[in-house]
Image (tube, helix red, strand yellow):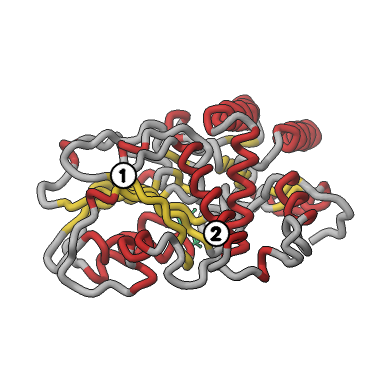
Amino acid sequence: MGSFTHRIYNFNAGPAMLPTPVLEEAKEEFLNFRGTGMSVMEMSHREKPFQTILDESIADLRSLLSIPDNFAVVYFPGGATLQFSALPLNYLQEGDSADFSLTGVWSNKAFEEAKKFYPNVKSIFDGKESKFTAIPKLTDAHINKDAKYVYITSNNTIYGTRYKEIPKLKNAPLFADMTSELLSRKLNINDFSVIFAGAQKNIGPSGLTIVIFDREKIPNVNHPIPNLMNLKLMDKNGSLYNTPPTYSIYIAGLVFKYVKKLGGVSAVEEINERKANKLYDFLDQSTYFYAPVPKENRSTMNVVFRSHDDSRDKEILDEFEKQGFAGLKGYRDVGGFRASIYNAMPEEGIDALVSFLKEFERSKT
Ligand SMILES: *Cc1c(COP(=O)(O)O)cnc(C)c1O
């Protein structure tokens, strides 16, 4: 870690960079939130000031993603990982099955967790042979007849891949872990039955998870579900069954307002594509660095890249640190480099990174 006196370009995968104006607003209101005389952190979750924060955040998210009324939007504690257990428990019963598309570490974890409770769940795609650079084009033909749902990780944070086209399925409801891309691209919510996202990649602080689900498609299962994993119960209580992560909800709410001010999800999607293309275009013409993921599967949020001479990777990483580029080390099993460029990463951050990579290449080749 350096000793910087200013905010640096933070390419961490998550927890990740938040928009500076959001942090400034939070700082401004930190000790005394809008004349309440207290910090949001110190407020009762049952009183009006916090209820307003909660309601506005959900209304803003609904409008940003055009979420239809039959979908619930609920805040959960426990991170995205809690939903790996919660979703099977809410949607499956003994003997039931669901189909999982295994495109990386997170979908594998979700699959293994579901299998603990429901051993009949099936894998319908495994990206292992492609070293997880492949993304399937899922259609109804791939889906098992007994599948209660189809599970995907829409953006694979670690391998830097995504479903460029969201599968359109008629025969089974689609569930998507969108932790590392919710709010970065336009969506048709009706393509899904469940979308969930841990906040710490593109939305806010860690430990908060947003679950969006079709109320009409949630079954009555014949077994008990732990309260904090019970989608219907959490919805019925308006995300307030117990004390929710209040401060994290407040920050997420500020992020939603910030994205609205930028022009909404379609405006940020355009910026995100421009940012990612700048980096991929550089990598594709470089003789020193390259992007291992085929063009059609490339994530706009997590750009994975490598060098042709990995004996120098450590030197590059040290230099990144010195220059004030944080979080560029590839995931531990993947190696190389990864630039996570969520909504909050300004375009100047990409320009600065590309200039650095160009200069490094020039000096070493
Ligand atoms: C980070 C991540 C998770 C895990 O999130 P936690 O909040 O740590 O449980 C799950 N899925 C995806 C796609 C992720 O990127």
Tell me: 50 left or right of 145: right
Tell me the quarter of the image containing the N terminus: bottom right
What residue did someone put label 2 on?
Answer: 51
Is residue 319 something one can see in this rendering?
yes
The image position of residue 254, as x and y in percent, is 64, 48
Query: Dot 2: what SS?
Result: helix
Q: Earlier in the sequence, mark 2 or mark 1?
A: 2
Tell me the quarter of the image containing the C terminus: top right
Marks 2 and 1, how far apart at CA: 22 Å
What's the residue type where badge 1 is placed? Answer: Asn
What residue did someone put label 1 on?
Answer: 70
Quadrant in the rendering for residue 239: bottom left
Tell me which residue sits at (62%, 59%) in the image.
49
- Are the residues flagged by discs 2 and 1 in contact, CB closer than 8 Å? no
Tell me which residue sits at (68%, 41%) in the image.
345
Query: Dot 1: what SS?
Result: loop
Tell me: 326 left or right of 192: right
